[in-house]
Amino acid sequence: MKTISIMNHKGGTGKTTSSINIGAGLARKGHKVLLVDIDSQANLTEGLGIGEAEVSVYDSIRENKKLPILNISDNLDLVPASIDLLGAEMEIVSKIGREQILTKLLKPIRAEYDYIIIDCPPSVGLLTVNAMVASDTILLPLQGEYFAYKGVDRLLGIVKEVRENLNDTLDIGGVFITQINPNRILTKTIVEKLIEDLQEKVFDTKIRINVALAEAQLQGQSIFDYAPESNGAKDYEKLVDEILSKLN
């Protein structure tokens, strides 16, 4: 069983799109998957067709209640988020063991899943730290853009701090490039620079710009259900295969 956090402190990197479609892709291959939404924007929750959840991960974090688990499809479950998470970090900041709250909530159900995938907020606050402490592996989606590339060192430094102080088994599983235009010279330059700096940590699979990916989320579906023949579906299927190969 592996717990994977998909994180980037920058918004718009395809983090939630990747969480949905990596989770759905793993489930299609017969793995039992739990998606955990800890972003107050609740984009992952809405992107899987769930409106306002009556009970969300916020209730569990605040009141130490059992995680609410919704079944989405065969082999795919969801712990939904809500806008209430906006105040969660302030509410737990004074709690003892505040960085281990999510770890403790996941502990009773870990054995039920092959993969738990946590969609993190676009920030490095207490909720994201909770996700890192609860995880075995970090995956970093990164746009093929200069300013997205600039933030990688900072992210890697934060992961290193968490590994040294809170979770000594935490590993960076890899970086994958999203929203790529393979014909742009800038994109090629950034990919080459990433490979030079991070070597085998950079996934071979690149996620191309594909409007069907955004349309699928608006319909509350994974790309595999919405447009199975699209470039988005083909790219995420390749990425899932590479994740299975590299992380196992």
Image: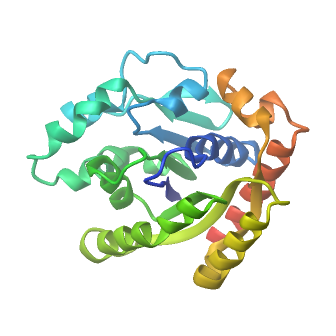
Q: Is residue 195 above or below residue 218?
A: below
Type of colouring: rainbow
Residue 64 visible to the viewer: no
Q: Nearer the viewer, residue 195 or 147?
A: 147
Quadrant where the C terminus is found in the figure: bottom right
Q: Is residue 124 left or right of residue 41?
A: left
Residue visible at 72% across and 56% down? 240
Q: Residue furthest right?
A: 229
Residue visible at 75% across and 60% down? 206
Q: Nearer the viewer, residue 92 or 168?
A: 92
How many numbered marks, from 0 up? 0
Quadrant of res 57: top left
Q: Is residue 211 left or right of residue 69?
A: right
- Residue 63 x %, y %: 19, 31
Q: Is residue 142 above or below residue 17?
A: below
Residue visible at 50% across and 67% down? 150
- Residue 235 x %, y %: 80, 52
Q: Is residue 84 left or right of residue 192?
A: left
Residue visible at 76% across and 69% down? 188
- Residue 53 x %, y %: 43, 18
- Residue 12 x %, y %: 56, 44
Residue 226 visible to the viewer: yes
Q: Nearer the viewer, residue 210 or 236?
A: 210
Q: Residue furthest front?
A: 185
